[in-house]
Each structure stands twice: as C-alpha cells, then as structure tokens.
Amino acid sequence: MLVIRKAEIEAVAVKPAQYPAPDLPEIAFAGRSNVGKSTLLNLLTGRNKLAKVSSSPGKTRTINFYRINDAFRIVDLPGYGYAKVSKSESEKWGKMMEEFLENREPLRTVFQLVDIRHDPTAQDVQMYEYLKYYDLDGPVIMTKADKVSRAQANKNAASIRKKLGVRSDVPMIAVSSLKYTGKDEILDVIDKILVQL
Ligand SMILES: Nc1nc2c(ncn2[C@@H]2O[C@H](COP(=O)(O)OP(=O)(O)OP(=O)(O)O)[C@@H](O)[C@H]2O)c(=O)[nH]1
Ligand SMILES: [Mg+2]
C-alpha cells in the first residue's frame, strides 16, 4: 500500500528549461479546466493547500511538478476548455502541453480526469486519443462523484467508457474530494505503475 508521507512543489514551468532534472518517474493529471486535477493532488497527498484550487476555471496555467516521497513526481497540468481564453493563449497551452507530453522522458503515464456527471467533451475525447497515440494513456479518473447517486455513477461510467474509447482492461475510478472516496484505489494504481518500472 502506497503511503504518501512527503509531498512538495518542485518546479513551476512553462518551458522545458524549467522542468526538474529527469531523475524520477512521473505521472501526470490531464483534463478540462475545473475538473478537479489540483484538488485530486491535494486529496492524494492529504495536503489541502499544496496545489491551488479554484471554482473559477483556469486556475493552473503552468506545468506544476510535485515531488512525492522523494521517489516519483505527480505533474499537475493546466486544464483545457474554458471559455475565456484568447487564441494566442490556447496556442501557448498547446505548445506547452506538446513539449511536455511528447518529449518528457520520465513521464510514464497520464491520468485522464473527466467529470462523472457529464459525457466527455470533444476536447476530452481529443486529449484521450492523443494520450493513446503516444502510449501514455493510463486510468481514467471520474471526479465529483459526490454529485451523483451510485446508480447514476455506474450508468455514466459505462457511457464515458464507450465515448472515450477506454479499453475494458483499463480502470476507471470514481473519486470525491468531498467524501474522500477513490483515494486508496488511485494510490494502488500508482503503486502498480511504479512497481512496473
Ligand atoms: N463536489 C466536488 N467538488 C470538487 C471535487 N473535485 C474538485 N472540486 C471542485 O471543483 C473546482 C475546481 O477544482 P480544481 O482542482 O481547481 O480544478 P482543476 O482541474 O485543477 O482546474 P484548472 O487548474 O483550471 O485546470 C473547485 O471548486 C473544487 O473544489 C469533488 O470531487 N467534488
Ligand atoms: Mg488546477
């Protein structure tokens, strides 16, 4: 059982020169802005204020590297898909993401986060396709599980699996930062990924 006993921010980057040395395996969180990536990092580490969270989308605009147990890193990526963004800003986002996802040697896998209440957006589908193409696709995390009933969650999970094209052997984990559910399951998955290295 993976226990996170140490978690610290190590780098805030908009370009590769600002990344930490590529000396530890990395797992990244991708997803729509406001889906709960930074909140998930706080939930997993048990540190409420480690990553900044906001109810207005577009909080994380940089690639944030968190060093965990001095053994691996979790990388909190800037979200996509919020309305108030200029063309030049979205181009910057695209370049920043591409540089990281296509060239970051220690990056092992990317967890795709989606909102359990809704079908995936076109950009969610695009992101997940991209991850599959680069062989970076990992488990799918369905956030905000406290906002739907158990029955609705199961129903939505099946629909999300189909629409995103998630293979049947890939885990989909429902999580709620409000109810603290899903945490152990995600830590287990991270543990397995790290052991396989
Ligand atoms: N009810 C509920 N709210 C959540 C959950 N996870 C996140 N939120 C809320 O969703 C909002 C956005 O969360 P963030 O963690 O900042 O989202 P993000 O994906 O990091 O967003 P960007 O940084 O803009 O990409 C905050 O108000 C959180 O409190 C959850 O499991 N349940
Ligand atoms: Mg964030």
Image (tube, grey):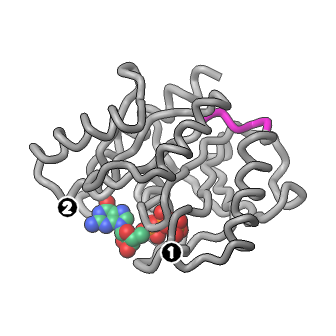
Residue 189 got which mark?
A: none
Q: Is residue 121 left or right of residue 8?
A: left
Magenta region, mostly helix, strand or loop?
strand
Label 2, label 1: how far apart the Cα atoms are: 23 Å
Horizontal and vertical percent for residue 191? 50, 31
- Looking at the image, the residue that sits furthest to the right is 17
- Residue pictured at 63% horizontal, 30% vertical: 133
Compared across the picture, whether 74 is left or right of 121 comes to: right
Front residue (pair 86, 49):
86
Q: Given the image, on which type of amino acid does mark 2 rest?
A: Lys
Q: Quadrant of the N terminus?
A: top left
Question: Looking at the rendered structure, which numbered label has been put on residue 147?
Answer: 2
Visible residue check, residue 47: no
Task: Please name the amino acid that badge 1 sits on.
Answer: Ala
Q: Position of residue 26 (x, y in %)?
A: 66, 41
Q: Which residue is mark 1?
A: 83
Magenta residues? 105-109
Tell whether circle 2 marks a residue whose Cβ is less than 8 angstroms from ligand 1. Answer: yes
Residue sitting at x 70%, y 63%: 93
- On screen, residue 3 above or below 84: above
| Residue at disc 1, secondary structure | loop
Q: Give me the residue at 65% from left, 33% from top.
A: 108
Image spot of residue 8 (x, y percent): 63, 61
